Structures are given as C-alpha cells and as structure tokens.
Image: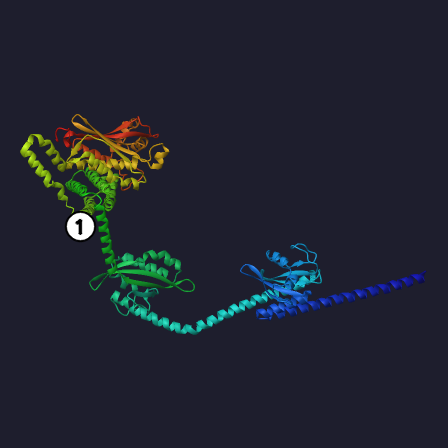
Amino acid sequence: MNRIKMVRTEKNSRNSTRFSRRYEETRMGTGLRQQVEVQALMDVLLKLSAIHEADSLFRALMESLCQATGSELAVLYFEEDSRWVALTAHNIRIEQSDNFKNKVDQPFIQKVLNTRPTIPVVRRAQDKLYGHATTSGSALLLPLMAEGKVAGYCYLANSQLYDLFDKRSVEFAQPIASQGAIALRNIRLNKQLAIEKDEISKLHQTLELRVIEQTRDIKSIMKHIQMGICTVSGDEIVINKDYSTFLERVLGKAALHNKQLLPLLFDRSSFTEDEIDQAKQALSASLGGVEFMFDVNAHLLPRQITYQSNNKESVLELDWIPISDDNEKVERVLITVNDVTELRGLQAAAARKDEELHIISEILGPSERDWAQFSTNGQALLTRNHEQLLLLRAGGDSMDVLKKIFIHTHTLKGNARALGLRRMNQVIHENEQYFADCIRKGAMTMDADSLEKKLDDIELAFYEYQKIAQQKLGRNVSKLDSVSIAREPVSQMYDYLKAQADQSVNHILREIRSSLFISVRELFLQLFKEMQPLAAELGKLPPEFQLDLPDLWVGRPTEELFRNCLVHLLSNSFDHGLQSARVREQKGLSAQGCISISAEMSGPNIQFIFEDDGHGLNLKKLSEMGLQRGLLTSREAHDSQTIANLIFNPDLSTAREVSDLSGRGIGMTAVKEALESVGGHIEVRLNGDRMVEDGFSAFSFVISLPLGLFQVDTGQSAA
C-alpha cells in the first residue's frame, strides 16, 4: 500500500510540474506578443507624426488601419459645406460604380455620420440596424478625434469576415486614427503658419520703407496743416518735440518745445484762475494714471476758449485725447487746437438768418390787421409794465406792482401764443418764471434792477418781431389808426348825401361802421381760428365752436379787451376743460368737444355766457388746495360757489405742471381785472343740470359788459 501511495504521489507531482511549466510558457508568449503589438503601434504612430503633407498622411493612415484591422479597403470622409464627402480611399476608387456601391455600405455610412459619433461604430454582416442586411462581411466607421473634436471619419471594411472588428482590433485602431487626426491638424496649422510667416516676411521687408514714408508724411502734415497739434507730458505739462507749425501761429510764440502749454493757452483767454487750475489738476491727475482717471476729469478740460492775440480775438476749439502705453497708463495727452473764429462767425450769421426766417414765417401767419392789433396791444402792455416799474422805484407796494406786471406779461404771452409766435412766447415764458418765483417766495426777494432786466429781455424779443415785420414785410402798425375806403363807396356816399340824405344815412353809416369797427362774431371766429392749433399740441381734436350773438360791433379798445380775455378763457378750455378724443368716447361723448358763446341784452349791460362741454371744474381739488394755502375756511370749504370763485385767485392753479400754455394760476385774475377796468365783471355759474365725473361740476363763465362799449345794429340805426 505504501508503495502504491508513493507511486501515486510521485505521479501527481510530475503532472503538477508539467502543468506549471506549460502555464508559464503560455504567459510568457502572450506578454511577448503584447510587447510586439505595442512596439508596432508606436512605430505606426511615430511614422504618422513624422508626415508633413496631407495626401501622404491619408495614404499612410489608411494603409496602417487596414493592416491593423485586416480590412480590405478604407475610405476617408471629411465635412464640406455641412455635407460629409468621401475625399480619398485605399484599395478602391471613389466613383459611382457597382463595385464601389457593393463594397462601401453608403446607407450605413450616411446614417451614422448624421449622428456625428465620437466612438467607433461596428457593423457586422447580420446587422439590420442601418436599413438592410448585407450578405457577408463587416464594416467599421472610425472617428478621427483630436482634442475632443471630430476631424473626420475612416470607413474600414472586409467583405469576407463578418466578425472582423472585435474589441481588441478596434482598441488597436483607435490610437492610430487619433494620431492621424493630430497629424492632420498639425499639417493644417503648419500650412497656415507658413502662409502667415510668408505674409510677415513680406510685411517686414516693406516695413522700414513704410516707416520712412510715414515719418516723412507726418512731418509734412505737421508743417502744413492749418491746425495746432501737439502732445504734452511730465509734471509740468510741457509741449513735446513734434508739434505743428500752425500752433506757433495760433499761440503767437516760436520754439514751443519743452514750454508749458497751459500758460501759453489760457493766460490770454477769458478763463479764470480757478478754471485754469482745474484744467491743470485734471491733466496732472491723468498723466501717469490709468485711462479711467482721464475720463473722470475730462469735463474739466475746456473744449472752446476765446483767445486774445495781437489785438485780435479768436475762438479756439480744443480736443484732448489720451495716449496710453502697453499697461494702459496715460503717458501723453494729444491736444488739437483749431481756429474756428470764421466758422463760428458764419454759424452765428446763419443762425441769425435762420432765426429771422422762422420769425418771418410766424409773422406771416396772422393777417395784417391781427398783427397790427397784437402789436398795438403788446406795446400798451409793455408800457404799463414800465409804469409799474417806475412806481416800484418810487416806493410803491412791491407785491402789488409785481402782480400787475405778471398779469400784463401773462396776457402778452397768451396773445403771442394765440398768433403762433412761438419764439416770442418762449422768451416771455422763461422770464415770466422769475415773476412767479418772486410772488411765491415774497416780493422781498425781488429787486428793481433784476425786474427791469427781465422786462428788457421781453421787450427785446417783442421789438425784434416788430423790426422784422416792418423792415422785411412792410407791416406798419400805424395803419391800424387809419381807415381805408375805396373810391367807389366814397362816391356813392357823396351822391346819396347830395340827393336824398334823409333816406340813406343808415346805409352810409353801415359802410363807415364796417371800416371803423369789427363785428363781435367775426372777432370771436378769428380768435377761435388762431387758437385751434393748440388743440393738436395738446393731443385733442379741434372743438366745435358755436355762437349765438346779436349783431354787435366793437372798436379798437373793446376788441383789445376781448382778445386779452378770450385768449385766457379759450386756453383754459383747451387745456383743462375738454378731454382727449379717447376719453370723451369712453364717456359716450362726441370725440370733438364743443365751446359755445352766447350773448343777450340785460338792462344797461350785455351779458356773455362762455362754456364748454368738458369735465367741468375740479371742485374737490380746488377745495383741497384752498384749505392747504389758507384761502378757505373749513366752513367755506363746503360751499361750492365759494370754492369755484377761487379760480380768480392768483395764488392758485389746478394745473399739474407749468407749461407755456397754462399752469401759472394768473390767467383768470388777468381776465377779471381787465373786465373790471372797463366797468364789467365776470362770475362762475355752476350748472348742476349737466352730469360730470365725481368731484367736478359743470359750469359757465358769465361776463357782463356795459352796453356803451358796443355798436348795436337794431335794424334802424348803426349806433
């Protein structure tokens, strides 16, 4: 037994040794094969990386991939104009032939390329994933990847073996494809670099000549250009070497190199010491600092100065431009000095001419009679203002003087606005603000000299219009005081008076009346026509104008009165009363709106009723403002008529903002005082019959004027 055991043990030991030896030999053979494959792969990669021409690279890449995978053919695909195109092939010609169609699986290629895969895609003979199943062979679409981007694809195929592309062969082929993509990228980069290098070389060859030419050109420009040009630098802000010859002529100095710029530039200018110091500090802070510091201080550098040189005044236009180094630090500042004296003179003359043409176009708007009426009325208002100014200098009540001047000025502005004299209106509006501020702050803030200056500004604008009207257009205000009657009516008067005076007096007097007076109806229609453009400016439709008047005629004083009053009443209706077309239509009203004026005899007076169909008087707002300003007691705040009467108070306006049309709160005061000065009066009549929105009340203005101000046609006489 022991012998058997010993034999068995020895046999087992020999078998074990034989198995270990065989295993060791197999392991050593596999490792050797792997080393050979790695070395072969490295050789291929080195070979590809050493190629510097695209076609040679493509051939070597396809041959290497076919050898590495056992493929019969290879085709390289690259993208052109968003389409994948077969660019070159190995062991097959790229053409539209049966051989190419049979060996290159186009449906497989196109469907895979549409997805732009970044990993290899294998197709075996049995696969039906790409539209059909081939009878034999297999294919591989291998991406050429470089730095994570697809440079192209290599199609590999074998028509005999359907399972050719296993995991190991694919893994072996991938680094070859990547190296091919990297080599291709390098070739393209080298080609681009070669092109750029050639361009740089050509540029370098001509650079020196161009520098010489440009230097010569710059020197020529600096010598002949009619503009002062220089750069400054350093703590003292001195002029650098290269500057234009014209700068010496502008500054009246020669040899400017290393001289301080600012004293030369500003000592003969109208600049103050403080302004010069600010400019110096701005430049000092900018030089050597970042560009941002220049931008921050640029507003302290003047853009235009008036310069005195050789008893001649010049206007110089300046421009300041920072010049920075590679670190974006300002190392110099370029200054250009342009003598624009003649140009500014031409611009000023053109501006005056343009202003004159605008004024002429505005004067031509109204008729000659309306212009003469406005001129006479305006002269009277300005005269009253100067009378008030003399009263102030003589010790008169300053607040009373100021309010009267304000009323006269406001009325003049309204008349100018009604005739479309926009430029005059704007000047008056701007100066009128001074009067409003003084009234609000108290008359003690006003001095007679400042007031006179404001009145002079208004007069200057007014008489500029008068001068142009008379000199350029031949409009003479004195014509208003003369009566022009044609020869034929005068002859008829003579014949009638001679033959039958008792029967023709009324007819002749009516002829004379039409020359001496104006119909109230015609006057109102003229005023309404003049005011209509205001509706468009306020975004409203021109309202309908209804008149119900007896046959009334007025002379110049009463015509002036109506003009001064109605311009304020119509402005109020346009601005405060009538709503926009959209608002009116939302309330079920006509889009246009309506203003009506009627008149009737009332004893020794004629009573006019003025009203519009707008949203009425804002009693709620008036009450609140009256209480806030101490114009109402708490008891009066419940009386609608007392509240309504506040509109004649000069210290109150319901307008949300002041414009050149309304908002001062002085218009109705002007109307009231003007009417009372001729024995008339005005009142607000609330109308509860017409419904308006909450807090508002429909109303009308009732104006009473003495009958003696009118010529009334009763059908029997003219007076």
In this view, which residue lies farthest toward the right? Answer: 1
Q: Secondary structure at mark 1?
A: loop
Local crowd size for mark 1, using a 10 Å CA cut-off: few (<14), some (14–19), many (≥20): few
Left or right of 144, for residue 319: left
Q: Residue at x 34, y 72 (%)?
A: 216
| Quarter assignment of residue 714 | top left
| Quarter assignment of residue 298 | bottom left
Observer able to see residue 117: no
Q: Residue 560 versus residue 155: which sits nearer the camera?
A: 155
| Quarter assignment of residue 36 | bottom right
Residue 182 lies, in percent from the top left, at 59, 65
Write down the residue under mark 1: 472
Observer able to see residue 589: yes
In this view, which residue lies farthest toward the left? Answer: 498
Q: Which quadrant does the C terminus fall into?
A: top left
Q: How many marks?
A: 1
Q: Which quadrant does the N terminus fall into?
A: bottom right
Left or right of 364, for residue 142: right
Q: Residue at x 36, y 37 (%)?
A: 582
Residue 671 lies, in percent from the top left, at 21, 35
Left or right of 25, for residue 410: left
Q: Residue 259 versus residue 697: which sits nearer the camera?
A: 697
Residue 338 lies, in percent from the top left, at 28, 62
Q: Residue 504 versus residue 670: which sits nearer the camera?
A: 504
Residue 322 lies, in percent from the top left, at 36, 62
**Label 1 sits on what residue type?**
Lys
